[in-house]
Amino acid sequence: MKRPDAHDTEVAIRRRSSLDVNLGDRTFRLVTAAFAAGAVVILASIVVQLFQGAWPSIARFGAGFLTSSDWDPVHDKYGAVPFLYGTVMSSLVALMITVPIAFGVAIFLSELAPPWIRGPLGFMVELLAAIPSVVYGLWGIFVLAPFMRSDVDPILRTLFGWTGFFSGPTNGHDMLTGAVILSIMILPTIASISRDVLRAAPPTLREGALALGATRWEAVRTAVLPYVRSGLVGAVLLGLGRALGETMAITMVIGNSDRAHQSLFQGAQTMASKIANEYAEASNDLHLAALTEIGLLLLAVTLLFNLAARILVWKMRGPVGQRPV
Amino acid sequence: MSIALAKQATSIEPRRRITDVVMRGLCVAATVIALIPLVAVLYYVASKGVGAISWEFFTHDSSTPPSEPGGGMSNAIVGSLMVVGLACAMGIPVGVLTGVYLSELGRDSMFARTVRFTADAMSGIPSIVIGVFTYTLIVLHQRHFSALAGGVALAIIMLPTVTRTTEEMLKLVPDSLREAALALGVPRWKAIVTIVLRTAAPGIATGVMLAIARVAGETAPLIFTAFGNPHVSTSLNQPVGTMPVLIFEDAKSPYDELNRQAAAGALVLVAFILLLNITARLVVRRKK
């Protein structure tokens, strides 16, 4: 028999290893791609499942679901207006409270604070996001709501009672307390993304402004802020997306009233809190379908806001992921 | 440097300087205001919780009548461990493998971009909607609440976080490592598993810890999936009590004793979550 020469050996090695490599690699690619496809399948099935679950209600009420304020499981009448209103109103009030503060935090952390304090402070702001919603709710029931009732609400009533938004008696479990607790919970989202957006602005912008004799604040206002405006809008939209879907804390302090009131001192109900309160005890199939339809609406709205926000923030600092600390 | 120069070169009008000082002061004030709730919540949970915590809290279940002292949360502690454990068992492997696909194999392909977009979209879905989905998917078909359903809900919530962190962490691994492995004749999958994943492991662990910290406190998706159970149950097919849901119920209760239990539960939960967050932080710092 002929001794195998170098060529034969090389061919043999290449054949064997290429087979191994290809088999192993192909399997690996297939397996990981299958799991990756899983994510798409899950999102698609969330949409399909909710749509199917909500179908009896959609078929029965059609657009009336979005225009009626009747929520009456006993007579099988369902309209979502008070909850749509509760969600929109509480989120807007929360934004009005939190946006100026969050921007202040972001500007401080990215532009003004001495470097040694930025890390720890940023971490503390992120801890605000780490505290579970139900713990905020607990604190809301026993600390925030009594505080609002005895200290904040009387002042607002005296000053702004004439507007109609701050009138009437309250026990502290009302729209306003719900909005305040929401504003606390969405602050870290808005603040940390705004900070990242500000940091992504080229340093030459502020150096140029400072070199022209601008003060620190003028540099921020005239050079940095205009450059990052759309990113900041994106940060606010992401915060809004979170506010719309936030459930536990607001369920615990908003007073759970099925009517829409003008006064923020009245109890209210959001889409999320309505689901949290009634889903486990839905009295019949149509009731369940109506609650599922609220879930479907919530899904549609939050997906829309997140999409818009991500496009805006992407432009500034690259894709938004759940970045590590 | 530039600031010092600017200060020297121009004498700033008083009005501009006052605006500057005021606005900078407002930014500092905003930061202080933002951190007040953090301090207030932690203080409340610590001060109320420490007094309410006892040995019985860990050894007794919540079936004790609310009028009597001595109840505990053992059922909820076991239930939470089960549900979060289930979520990890499902969410971590799927998330890590998806992340590997995105960073190492799919890269900029159309499919990879779709998956990346999906993961981002999923991270914005309110957790209560995930709960509704899991209910219609599992509970409605099984006709009863179960630990399994709770685990599935939490796994879906974990998935995008784990996926995106894995991808980001793998991208930080220098290409020279991959090339070196491939040059030695190591097949690609082996290079990814033994070299790339290994290098990125601390970062991925950080992401996983943060994901666990997040789902450990999730309440909304568990109310109508894991539901609740006043007794310790270790069956996947039975409803189980969980810490967040029990805290929710005890907090709403008119009984002082249950309110105290809620505070104790919140203390344990917050301590666990803070510990995970701080550990994650330390892992990142050590790597730097």
Image: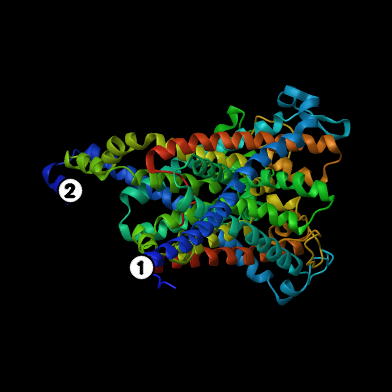
Left or right: where does residue A95 sit relative to residue A62? left
Q: Is residue B233 visible?
A: yes
Closer to the camera, B104 or B265?
Answer: B104
Q: Nearer the viewer, residue B60 or B276?
A: B276
Label 1: which residue?
A: A6
Q: Residue A197 appears in which quarter of the rendering? A: top left
Q: Residues within 10 Å of mark 2 (few under 14, many from 20)?
A: some
Residue A301: percent from left, percent from top: 60, 34
Q: Going by the picture, which residue comes out furthest to the front?
A: A1
Tell me if residue A308 comes above or below residue B259 in the rendering.
Answer: above
Question: Dot 1 lies on which element?
Answer: helix
Distance of label 2 from label 1 (alpha carbons): 67 Å
Camera-side residue of A104 and A273:
A273
The vertical placement of A156 against B249, above or below, is above
Determine the image quadrant of residue A9: bottom left
Check the image and tell me how it is coloured: rainbow
